[in-house]
Image (spheres, rainbow, N blue to C red):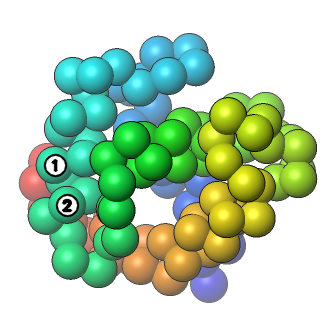
Amino acid sequence: MITPKVVLQQIILTIGAIMKKEYISEEAWSKIFCFLKSNKSVYCGNEKKCKSFMEAIYWISRTGAQWRELPEKYGKWNSVFSRFNAWTKNMEQINGLLYSRT
């Protein structure tokens, strides 16, 4: 069973090497967003909000904080958590795409 903790670890391992300390560079983000858009099972929505969502996941995993402690600059904690929870259901499919491209 895939738990949220396992999903967070997979995300960090996947994009951690191309991320700076607290943000995703524009070059890295363009590659990440292009990949996410190509996967029909992943909802990306607005690019700016999607980047903020990914940075929120990184912040949670880096700090180990509870979702309720997520800074407001990333959006409402419950909305970010709900979206993350939905993404975890598609994580096996996303991982398959990631590893097939490497």
Indicate which disc residue 37 carries: 2
Where disc 1 sits, the SS reads helix
Question: Disc 2 marks which amino acid?
Answer: Lys
Confirm whether residue 53 shows in the render.
Answer: yes
Relative to 99, say whether 31 is above or below: above
Kindly identify the residue that appears in the image at 53 percent across and 48 percent down: 53
Neighbour tally class for label 2: few under 14, some 14-19, many 20 plus, Cα within 10 Å = some
Residue 62 lies left or right of residue 41; in this view the side is right
Residue 82 lies left or right of residue 7; in this view the side is right
Indicate which disc residue 100 carries: none
Tell me if label 2 and label 1 are in contact, CB under 8 Å: yes
The quarter of the image holding the N terminus is bottom right
Question: Disc 1 marks which amino acid?
Answer: Cys
Q: Residue furthest top?
A: 21
Horizontal and vertical percent position of residue 48: 39, 41
Neighbour tally class for label 1: few under 14, some 14-19, many 20 plus, Cα within 10 Å = few
Residue receiving disc 1 = 34
